Amino acid sequence: MITKTHDEQISQEFDITKSPIVLEIYETFPLLLCHDGFFFINVGFEQQSWQDLQTYLSKEQMKLCDMIRYRLSFDKIKLHIRKVDSRQVFTSYGTLEVRLVVSGNVKVLGG
């Protein structure tokens, strides 16, 4: 289902349980940037997915900034497309940024 929010953001949800997406963390500040070996994307988390990641970090006694080069696997995502100033947001093109929002299970595959 495609939804449009008040701030000109378009959202589309995908369930990808048959073949989960695996991305490597490239940078954790100021954006959480991940890549698949070719493309970089800004990644965000919904509440439950973020709690799953925080549980892992707490168990391993790590901080998010320690996870550079770690791989994450997830099975449910949303893609948000929003208008931004491309001069300030380098992950955008032509005033549009695609942001991947994890809304399902998160697994940490190691670094």
Image (tube, grey):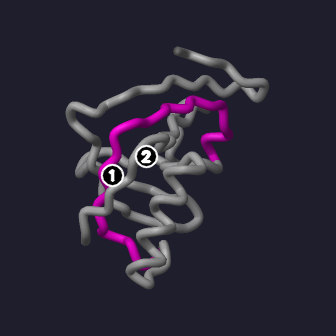
Q: Amino acid at mark 1?
A: His
Decide which of tag 1 and tag 2 comes sooner along the chain: 1
Residue 107 appears left or right of 90: left
Spot occupied by residue 85 in the image (x, y as percentages of width and height): 67, 40
Q: Residue at x 28, y 61 (%)?
A: 71
Residue 50 vs 61, above or below: the answer is above
Residue 107 at what x, y percent from top left? Answer: 32, 57
- Quadrant where the C terminus sits is bottom left
Q: Is residue 5 left or right of residue 26?
A: right
State the residue at coordinates (49%, 33%): 78
Mark 2 neighbour class, 10 Å CA radius: few under 14, some 14 to 19, many 20 or more? many
Magenta segment: 65-87
Amino acid type of the residue tagged 2 in the rendering: Ile
> What percent of the width, then of the height, locates residue 94?
55, 30
Q: Residue furthest top?
A: 1
Q: Decide: few, some or many residues near mark 1? Use Cα within 10 Å; few <14, some 14-19, many ≥20.
A: some
Q: Quadrant of residue 30?
A: bottom right
**On the image, numbered disc 1 is attached to which residue?**
35
The relative height of residue 63 versus residue 79 in the rendered view (above or below) is below
Rendering coords of residue 96 (x, y %): 57, 31
Residue 105, numbered label: none
Question: Can residue 68 be found in the magenta stretch?
Answer: yes
Depth check, front residue: 10 or 108: 108
User: Label 2, on which residue?
Assistant: 41
Q: Is residue 81 magenta?
A: yes
Looking at the image, residue 72 lies above or below residue 38: below
Q: Name the residue rendered at 60%, 50% in the picture.
A: 47
In this picture, residue 64 sits left or right of residue 5: left
Marks 1 and 2 close (CB-CB < 8 Å): yes
